[in-house]
Image (cartoon, grey):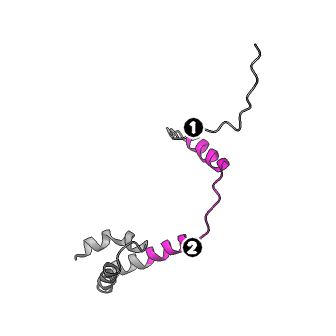
Amino acid sequence: MNNELYSKLVDLYAGHELPAELEDQMELAAVADGGLNHEITTLRRVVDTLQSLEEPDFTEESYHRILMKLYARGADIQPQAPVSTHFQYNLPLQG
């Protein structure tokens, strides 16, 4: 395989998504190409570090805070789920 193909597979290599044979081929190609070697080692280290971190809490409050920031910056966002109304009080109808 040529180095152009290897450079396209770096993200799959970093995420441990390639078969073992192809990973071995990439590592052999990286020995000959210093740039490819730097790319696969640093990106794999970053992916491993990110995967080892614990998940952040993403609450409904976080969702609304992010959504309001996007609206304030002019983003035209149409959420798939309807916006929660738990911040709004329902008043009884007088009739």
Residue 28 lies left or right of residue 68; in this view the side is left
Rendered location of residue 31, percent (x, y): 32, 86
Q: For the residue carrying disc 1, how many other residues have a C-alpha within 10 Å: few (<14), some (14-19), or many (20+)? A: few
62 magenta-colored: yes
Q: Could you say which is closer to the camera, residue 82 or residue 31? A: 82
Q: Quadrant of residue 93?
A: top right
Give the answer, above or below, for where 17 lies relative to 88.
Answer: below
Q: Relative to residue 20, is residue 60 depicted above or below?
A: above
Number of dots carrying numbers: 2
* Residue name at image x 39 percent, y 72 percent: 17
- At which x and y percent is residue 90? 73, 29
Q: Which residue is mark 2?
A: 52
Q: Quadrant of residue 52?
A: bottom right
The answer for how far apart the CA atoms under marks 2 and 1 are is 33 Å
Q: Main secondary structure of the magenta part?
A: helix
Residue 4, quarter of the rendered image: bottom left
Q: Residue at x 51, y 75 (%)?
A: 48
Placement of the N terminus among the 4 image quadrants: bottom left
What residue do we see at 67% from left, 36% from top? 85
User: Is 86 colored magenta in this rendering?
Assistant: no
Tell which tag, 2 or 1, sits nearer the viewer.
1
Q: Is residue 86 left or right of residue 20?
A: right
- Residue wearing tag 1: 82
Three-letter amino acid code at disc 2?
A: Ser
Q: Amino acid at mark 1?
A: Pro
Question: Residue at (71%, 33%) from the top-left corner?
Answer: 88
Tell which of 43 and 23 is nearer to you: 23
The range drawn in magenta is 42-71
Asked if residue 6 lies left or right of residue 77, the reply is left
Query: Circle 2 — which element?
Result: helix
**x and y, in percent, of residue 6 in the image:** 29, 74
